[in-house]
Amino acid sequence: MRARRGQSQLHKVESGDDLDSRRVSELKNIIGSQAVLHAPEDLMLYEYDGSVDRALPDAVVFPSTTEEVVSTVCWAREKNFAILARGAGTGLSGGSVPVNGGVVIGFSRMKKIVEIDLANQRAVVQPGVVNLDLSLAVAKSGYYYVPDPSSQKACTIGGNVAENSGGPHTLAYGVTTNHVLGLEVVLPDGEVIHTGGKPLDCPGYDLTGLIVGSEGTLGIVTQAIVKLTRLPEAVQTILAIFNSVDDAADTVAEITARAITPAALEMMDQLALQAVEAATHAGYPCDAAAVLLIEVEGLREAIEVQTEEIRDACKHHAAREVRVAQSEVERQLLWAGRKNAFGAMGRIAKSFYVQDGVIPRTRISETLRFIGQVGEKYDLRIANVFHAGDGNLHPLILFDIRDHEQYRRVLQAGAEILAYCVSIGGSITGEHGVGMEKSDLMPLLFTENDLTIMGKLKSVFNRDGRLNPSKIFPTSKGCGEIQVGKQWAART
């Protein structure tokens, strides 16, 4: 059973006991008295992430070395406690929510950039390194780390690896897995393994690719080897303004049909624009039906040509205005509006439930219409802010968390939206992960045989389910407590 917001539940793996004072002392002896939290008021800070789910851990520990992670994992195994790794808690699918209680391993003290090798465009980092800090560390040398989730000022590399995080600028360059070459991983029995390495390709099975995106269910990452990329010679940021959502959506397909792959191609609808502009004053038009935020980068001459092509594509689909940022300040302000869009929703609603469905980019118009119909059906406002270039939707369903009936409708609406995405050839997640939020929807995308094979693979690494239990895979038959309409339930 899920531990939803306001319904914290503690379940140990099998028959584990509560964390009594003796066991607290044992943990403190292993990792240090200042590195263990166990008081209820402290644990409440670690019962949630950016999703709508909550559950209390039994303890939170903060190791400083891989050896301390190993010692904690071995102790938890001996005492029969679940183990869950946590970065900054910015995830949006309940991936770091300790639904089975147990011990949360927080990585805020393992935040060293171990090595920067500019000659070979590599860096070695601990999991607690903040995403943006890595780019800042190499910016003066003309490099950066490409994956840029909207939470990049706070989210950590370890969390990005676990969720295979994306971001606006991964349209052209790929998501986290395309920039991670090797990992140091602690398995649930305390064994430490190393996957991949600094070479671009290593022989044997691609265990690095397997662990990236496994949401902490196969092992705990304690170090990562990542690629660094040269900063582009020039960057151009374009804001296209439309009086019609359909026109904006059709422009997305038009741009890619012209053999242009922008570094980023984002879309926001009117409700999102109104919240964003009130929060950031970035110059977004509140009366527009939608805008596209488009960025091209590379050689100066090439992006000048691409900018004109994009301008023509936008005008072809009735854009009322196409602006090109005239300064770095204007460019950064436009991006501040986009990257702070989720937070801006607090101006127009007490809570929001963000979805992460993926669709073919040629189906954006009809999907947005369907989302609007879902909003009307359940009497909910839904704002749309998303990575239009790769069809990764982020409907933000606005509601009041204190209204239990409204909350029920929100969950139902979210499930119907994701089921629709699958029905037209898409997926239930593009970058936020499955976590506990979408686990019961996995049968929409995979057959029973598919899920069985995945479960067998998981058991090779995590035989007793001790690592991050109750995540990714269904906890009940079919779609569990969230039932979706039959018309969307068939796999395509």
Image (cartoon, rainbow, N blue to C red):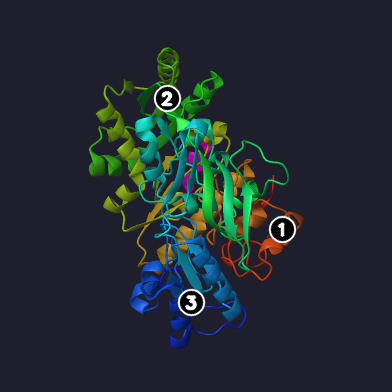
- Please determine whether, in this image, residue 286 is positioned above or below residue 194: above
**Where residue 28 appears, x then y in whole percent?**
43, 77
Earlier in the chain: of badge 3 and badge 1, it is 3
Say if the magenta span includes residue 265.
no
Q: Nearer the viewer, mark 3 or mark 1?
A: 1
Q: Which mark is residue 322?
A: none
Q: Nearer the viewer, mark 2 or mark 3?
A: 2
User: For this rendering, which residue is in front, 141 or 214?
Assistant: 141
User: For this rendering, which residue is in front, 492 or 445?
Assistant: 445
> Is residue 77 rendered to the left or right of residue 260?
right
Q: Which residue is mark 3?
A: 9
Q: What residue is rendered at 37% in x and 23% in y? A: 236
Q: Are marks 3 and 1 in contact (CB under 8 Å)?
A: no
Total numbered labels: 3
> Is residue 394 rendered to the left or right of residue 322?
right
Q: Residues within 10 Å of mark 2 (few under 14, many from 20)?
A: some
What is the quadrant of residue 421 in the picture? top right
Q: What residue is rendered at 41% in x and 46% in y? A: 131
Q: Amino acid at mark 3?
A: Gln
Which secondary structure, mark 2? loop
Earlier in the chain: of badge 1 and badge 2, it is 2
Q: Which residue is mark 2?
A: 232
- Please determine whether, in this image, residue 313 is positioned above or below residue 65: above
Which secondary structure, mark 3? loop
Looking at the rendering, in which quadrant would you find the C terminus? Answer: top right
- Quote the CA–CA distance across marks 3 and 1: 28 Å
Magenta stretch in the rendered image: 364-374
Q: Amino acid at mark 1?
A: Leu
Q: Which residue is mark 1?
A: 457
Q: Main secondary structure of the magenta part?
A: helix
What is the quadrant of residue 467 in the picture? bottom right
Q: Nearer the viewer, mark 1 or mark 2?
A: 2
